[in-house]
Image (cartoon, grey):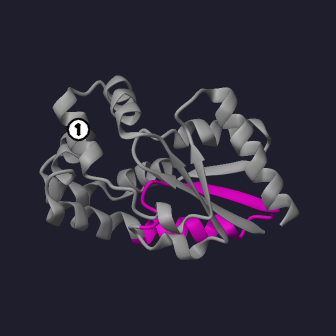
Amino acid sequence: MIKIGITGNIASGKSEFEKILESLNFEVYDLDILSKEIFEEKKDEIEIIFNTLNKKTIADIIFSNKEKKEALENIIHPKLKQKIFEIFKKDSDIVFISGAILYQSGFDKFFDKIIFVDAPPEIRLKRLIKRNNLSYDEALLRLNSQNDYGKDKADFIVQNSSDIKNLKQNAIKIINLLSNG
């Protein structure tokens, strides 16, 4: 099995890239979705830390409070790692797992190759405001909480500053490189 990680900054287009891979009949797992499942399993512990289970409130807190962010990661990441290894046990030739935190969590070392989906900050800011219904300042805070961590370590960088057609062409190029290499 070839294990491929997909990462990139917030609003870079990872989800669109995932949809394209799925349309090409590849298995794609999203760490955000897996994290939400773990959140539900561990909500009692999380509520003790944050005094709420409101995800927007928790997101606002972790984007501005490093200690609370680490506390949440200490609950979520061990279970997430376990789920990743369960996925690797499946009978597939190639598997894609997508998550913004691959490098920050150290999960990158579990993959054969990493794809970094990238887009310029101004495009990501517009996408984030629209997608999450955030104010400019809220979106900017989230955008600035991330950097291009891992971009220089990635095996492939996909520029997503154009349209879906271009993104699909880039996905197909990478699939061909992976299949032939």
In the depicted view, which residue is nearer to us: 116 or 20?
A: 116
Q: Quadrant of residue 169?
A: top right
**What residue would you read off at disc 1?**
140
Is 7 located above or below residue 160 in the figure? Answer: below
Quadrant location of the C terminus?
A: bottom right
- On the picture, is 99 further left or further right than 145? right
From the viewer's side, name the closer residue of 22 and 85. Answer: 22
Q: Nearer the viewer, residue 127 or 54?
A: 127
Measuring 26% from the left and 44% from the top, which residue is drawn there?
A: 142
Confirm whether residue 53 shows in the render: no
| One can see residue 167 in this view | yes
Residue 35 point in image, percent of width and height: 43, 54
Q: Position of residue 139 (x, y in %)?
A: 25, 35
Residues rendered magenta in the picture: 78-103
Q: Is residue 16 above or below residue 89?
A: above
* Residue 87 location, quadrant: bottom right
Q: Is residue 31 left or right of residue 114?
A: left
Taking the spot 54% from the left edge, 48% from the top edge, the residue there is 117
Question: Outermost residue, bottom direction?
Answer: 109
Q: Residue furthest right?
A: 180
Q: Residue at x 66, y 49 (%)?
A: 28
Measured as percent of width and height from the top left, residue 147 is found at 33, 55
